[in-house]
Amino acid sequence: MKTKRVLLACALGLLVAVSAPAMAIAQVLQPVPEVVAPPRAFKTAEEHYNYLKRHHRGGTVHTHESVPKWEGLWEASYNSIALRGGVSPFFVGPIPPGLAAGGEVAEGVLTPEYEAAFKQRREHMIPFNEQPYDRLTTCEAVGPARWLLEPYVREWVNTPTQSWWMNDLANETRRVFINQDHKNIDGANSPTGDSVGFWAGDQLIVWTNDMWPADYFRGYPPFSNEMQMIEVYQLVQEPNGLSRLEAQVTYYDPISLAKPLSGVYTWTRATVQEDAGYRIRHWDCDSNIQQKDANDLTTIRLPGEDGKTWHQHRNPDLPADLSGQTKTPGEVDFDSLIGSAQ
Amino acid sequence: MAVAALACAASATVAIAHHSFSMFDPAQEIVLEGKVVRWAFTSPHTFMIIEDAAGKVWAFEGAAPPALLARNPPMTGDTFKGGDPITVIMCPLRDGRAGGASGLFISADKVVYNPADAGCRANQRIADWPAWIEKGYKSLADAKAAGEAKAQ
């Protein structure tokens, strides 16, 4: 029992460490949300989704007035899958601190092929004490699984026909089409896949398919291009009056998972950022471009290393000295600084 | 339990950015003095560009704006302006180019800012670095050689 309390305390402590420092300790020291397993075992996300839709008699048809409002900035808080909770089904015992190497990979969670791949990834991390190359290096979209727990902030905007989930990270927006069927006229998977959903009172139930293969987080297992997810969202009011958005998520991936995997993710309002006037802007990936080096490691291109200004990069057909072509009036061109000095 | 939670929090090393930090050397913490050339308060990473006394321009990557707004003291796009004197404690790029990961910024009026992402852990020595700089240390190695950083 004492061990369990210490583990819970460590989980909460890690949450404190990965959250904004201004997050009130009282807010953090709430009961850890329980993972709610699906009402019964399902083989596929489609079975799971259709069962829930039948259970909720087709769901609730909301109007603009009645649809739950989750506006504002939110930041990732506790989850049971990776990084922010101190625990993960992919490791035995507490997870390695931060994104460090080490830890004991839990066996039997992944299929043998993906378990071996995950162990290979963890082995590869040891000399660097972290994953030395991350696919996000080139500003690739994180994908829905990682979207749930990444840092930065995000917004949820619900309408009766769509929900728009906007993440500061890579500015990746998920669109959930309410009371609609999956459509894929592209004939291909996409970074965020295709999400459909329905409301059951104040719960939003979402089914996502057709995603690119990706990962749960840096240093965590990959999943395949057959991954599908069921997410059940609800705004929870804590006894102390604070709001927490919670999602019970079940992953279905016959290629990478030995059996469907469930977890819980939570978010709290980013009041510090809101009070400071923060607004999500488009990412500025040109100012500090990450790239893969000759050894397959992440590195950065320093501004101006190739001798071109930002304007020259984006307007090769225009005069190099054209007026008014820095990002902000009066600004020294970012890319010209180092290039001109070396 | 709250004490245990905080103890675990204090011991955690957290990376919260979108890419690996393996290109930076966290074992080195180096002091650079110069003037701000450009402070870019941009996502996915902030960037501090300074010019040192020899006229060499350096660029340092830091945490993203949402994180810096929650630091103490907070930082915005107006916190540092071109021409401001600044001291940077940084962890250099392993390949020797003129850049690195931001660790700490110290302004002319001695305010210590923590802009670090997980590429540099100088912020874990935020209470030590101002005094070490007063003593003339130019790196974590200097502090260690003087017996100041034994417990680090």
Image (spheres, rainbow, N blue to C red):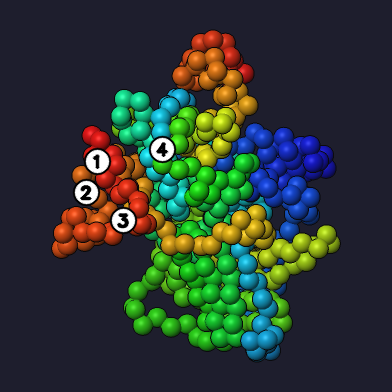
For marks 3 and 2, the one nearer the N-term is: 2
Q: Amino acid at mark 3?
A: Thr
| Quadrant (top left/top right/bottom left/bottom right) for the C terminus of chain B | top right
Q: Which mark is residue A339?
A: 1
Which of disc 1 and disc 3 is earlier in sequence?
Answer: 3
Residue A186 as seen in the image, left or right of residue A46:
left
Q: Position of residue A141 (x, y in %)?
A: 42, 61
Residue B83's tag is 4
Tell me the kind of residue under disc 4.
Answer: Gly
Judge whether A174 appears above or below A32 on screen. Answer: below
Q: Say above or below: A86 vs A61.
A: above
Residue mark closest to the camera, 3 vs 2:
3
Task: Please tell me whether residue A261 is drawn above or below residue B25 in the rendered image.
Answer: below
Q: Which mark is residue A326?
A: 3
Kindly identify the amino acid type of the residue bearing the numbered disc 2: Lys
Mark 2 crowd level (few <14, some 14–19, many ≥20, 10 Å Cα): some
